[in-house]
Amino acid sequence: MTALGSLFLQAAFVENMPLTFFLGLCTFIALSRKTGPALGLGIAMIAVMGVTVPLNHLIYNALLAPGAWRWAGLPEIDLSYLKLIAFIGVIAATVQLLEMVLDRFFPAIYASFGVFLPLLTVQCAILGGSLFMVDRNYDLAESAVFGLGAGFGFAVAVVMLGAIRARLAYADLPNGLRGLGITFILAGMMSLGFSSFAQMVTS
Amino acid sequence: MAPRAGLLSILTEPLIRQNPVTLQILGICSALAVTTSVATALTMSAALTAVLVMSAALISLIRRHIPDSIRLIVQIVIVASLVIVIDQLLQAYLFEISQRLSVFVSLITTNCLVLGRTESFSRHNPPLRSMVDALGSGIGYSLVLTVIGSIRELFGAGSLLGWQVLPTVDQGGWYTPLNLMLLAPSAFFLLGGLVWAIRTVLPEQSEASEFLSPDEPEDRA
């Protein structure tokens, strides 16, 4: 249990997707103008990552990993190079399913972050989470915790950045720095702050 | 961009004026992660440009046959297949660098730049124009990566492409490496500074004030 707990903290803070691995920056920057959309994006990220990482883990180990076809008498088959296409397919399908379920049963939630869901298909952080899971040989429980943790870390970071950017309404910035420039510099400062979490988990 | 712009302007437009990274916020996901040294930045740029040009050509060739409703899936599958080919090539011939790039080569699949160009340009234009456009965007991306990669490697390790330019203290020289340059935050700072510099030279790129205080009328911006 403590191992899983520290994995969660590690995925959320020490290895924060946007701030230390630069994953998912496109949506991270584009949707962090205000806290409202940022919160919607964060919740959608937690949901999608929490589902896709363990699902991809099952698919990878049952069908794609080297030796996965041993039960069929084909131990030499190694389909791991197909993982990209498989993962993308799973992510696209999950996002679509989530969208349909929300639309049918929770229309209020769907209305609040419906626009962000389709965007998540091409989110580097989500695909990155699945690829890291393969790289680091997580088991099923670990990959579920890792997915949730990474999604949570993304949500925290994007809401914080949204809150800071909303405050910039009262700042008088040089023309060239306004918008994108200052956002990068803010993200850099947040990244500096998050790097102090590095000592939090000893693995 | 004018609908019938010449090939040359399609090629040169994205280099600085319409740079995909600094103006359109496309493809920064991977741009920052691989810039700790010039070698990885160059490899990544070459890989991305190759994928971009080939996917533009393929998608543009079959653009009339893709049903609109499933075009995203079709595009992603084409891009993913190309990325797998590039990834296998890198592992075969440049194993050491491909280890350092780790998952970021695979992540070209979800690079917003690739899908952005196929979605907004290749879908409506013949193959040659699409390829030229893709090449321009690829070079624009490479420029940004190379600039940031050079600065980070020069000040973080005192070298360029592995050659020691500034002799570091460990090797008996005078230069104390700035370790911050090799960490994540410096990439954000450098890109922010680069955007600032470009927008100072080209003021038409700077954004209008995004935020209005609640008690001022909306049309003030």
Image (spheres, rainbow, N blue to C red):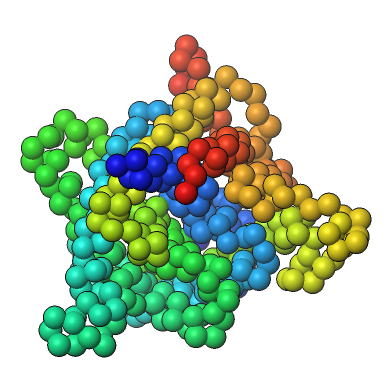
Which residue is drawn at the image coordinates 37% and 72% (left, top)? Answer: B79
Is A70 positioned to the left or the right of A178 in the image?
Answer: left
Query: Which of the 4 image quarters holds residue B150?
Result: bottom right
Taking the view exactly as shown, the residue that stands out farthest to the left is A104
Residue A25 seen in render: no
Query: Which of the 4 image quarters holds residue A76?
Result: bottom left
Is A133 positioned to the left or the right of B68 in the image?
Answer: right
Taking the view exactly as shown, the residue that stands out farthest to the top is B215
Pick whichever, A111 or A195, lies toward us.
A195
Task: Establish if A191 lies above or below B132.
Answer: above
Which residue is drawn at the image coordinates 21% and 58% (left, top)? Answer: A55
Pick whichever, A51 or B1, lies toward us.
A51
Residue B27 seen in render: yes
Quadrant position of the N terminus of chain A in the picture: top left
Q: At which x and y percent is residue A119?
A: 32, 50
Q: At which x and y percent is residue A44?
A: 28, 41
Task: Establish if A24 lies above or below B1.
Answer: above
Pick whichever, B192 or A94, lies toward us.
A94
Which residue is drawn at the image coordinates 56% and 30% (left, top)? Answer: B209
Q: At which x and y percent is residue A191?
A: 56, 40
Which residue is drawn at the image coordinates 73% and 71% (left, top)? Answer: B161
